[in-house]
Amino acid sequence: MAVQGGVLAPAPAMGRYLTFKLKTRARPRAALLKLAALADGERCVVGIGQATIHACGARIAGMRAFPRLSAKGMVLPSTPAALWCWLRGSDRGELVHQTRRLVHGLAPAYALLTVVDGFRHDGGRDLTGYEDGTENPKGRKAVAAAVAQGRGAGLDGASFVAVQSWVHDFEKFEAMSPHAQDNAIGRRRRDNVELAHAPRSAHVKRTAQENFAPEAFVLRRSMPWTDAQSAGLMFVAFGKSFDAFDAQLRRMTGADDKIVDALFKFTRPVSGAYFWCPPVKNGKLDLRALFKG
């Protein structure tokens, strides 16, 4: 049993994020089986939402709704979808054709909700110029953090993914001094060195994975995104469960200690959803956990 290859692989040069909703009274099995043949888990990572799991009459232990939290009077949105696909590649035209094939194959049961294009910027930096994913676990630690194991056939090799689209306010960010920007992140932009005396609200301090009990390690595979009017970061974090991400998000919003992450000074999430990423068997998605019986 294997994890979808795109979960552990570095972020690609280009990506495209698709979300789908279930059509009224749709039975998703046939469409999902077609998807299993179209998606290899490498060029197309697939996440299954609660609506699809329920429509299949299945239950995936650990799957739950995205939490509704608030920070500085702002509510972090929960925007569930029935299906999520992350297309990965280096040619935008090919991503367009992949999208067409997926939309056509899923059409009997699913309707396309959103399409967001992502890209790698400056070797792996956020559009603010700061390096993204510095604290990602590597090697065996990455697998341990991101991949479910010891749960049985059809479940081992799966992953849980949290997806949020963040919109940056570049005018607010650029109005901050370089010192204030570094303090908000907790690292120096010029060399990515962590600041020893950053304020407690710095993002690095809010989300230091080793400082949680238990430790809250996730595997980030985020990418910048843009459309005609806005831009920001598509935050994507894979985990063996949602527990680590939940803990980090609560800490960021100040739910535990009233200290809100300084990121909220210049960026905010406009979406939030949880998905279950099935394992791969013989080069295809293994959907046994959805179709038991």
Image: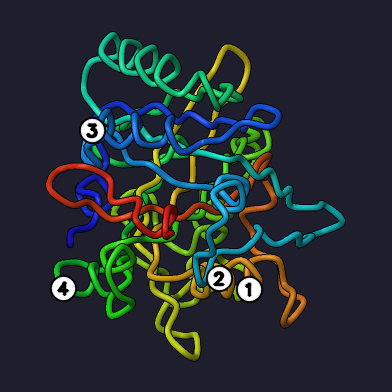
What is the quadrant of the C terminus in the image? Answer: bottom left
Residue 5 or residue 182, whichever sits in front = 5
- Residue 137 placement (x, y as % from top left): 26, 68
Cα gap from disc 2 to disc 1, whole angstroms: 5 Å
In which quadrant is the N terminus drawn? bottom left
Residue type indicated by callout 3: Arg
Q: Nearer the viewer, mark 2 or mark 3?
A: 3
Kindly identify the residue that appears in the image at 33 percent across and 49 percent down: 190
Pointer 2 residue:
248
Give neighbour class at mark 2: few <14, some 14-19, many 20+ (Cα, 10 Å). Answer: some
Which of label 4 and label 1 is nearer to you?
Answer: 4
Q: List the residue tagged with mark 3.
A: 43
Name the kind of residue labelled 4 in the image. Arg
Percent of width and height locating residue 62: 52, 71
Give the alpha-carbon distance from disc 2 to disc 4, as whole Å.
22 Å
For residue 56, side relative to residue 239 (left or right): right
Residue in view at x 45 percent, y 18 percent? 103
If you read the primary sequence from the N terminus, does the residue marked by circle 4 or circle 1 appear first? 4
What number is the disc on residue 251? 1
Among numbered discs 3 and 4, the one appearing first in the sequence:
3
Q: Secondary structure at mark 3?
A: loop
* Residue at 58% from the left image edge and 54% from the top image edge: 180
Q: Residue furthest right?
A: 73
The residue type indicated by label 2 comes to Gln
Q: CA distance from mark 3 to mark 1?
A: 33 Å
Q: CA distance from mark 2 to mark 3?
A: 28 Å
- Horizontally, is 221 left or right of 55 in the view? left
26 or 202: nearer the viewer: 26
Label 4, on which residue?
A: 140
Say left or right for 13 vs 216: left
- 10 Å neighbourhood of mark 1: few (<14), some, or many (≥20)? many
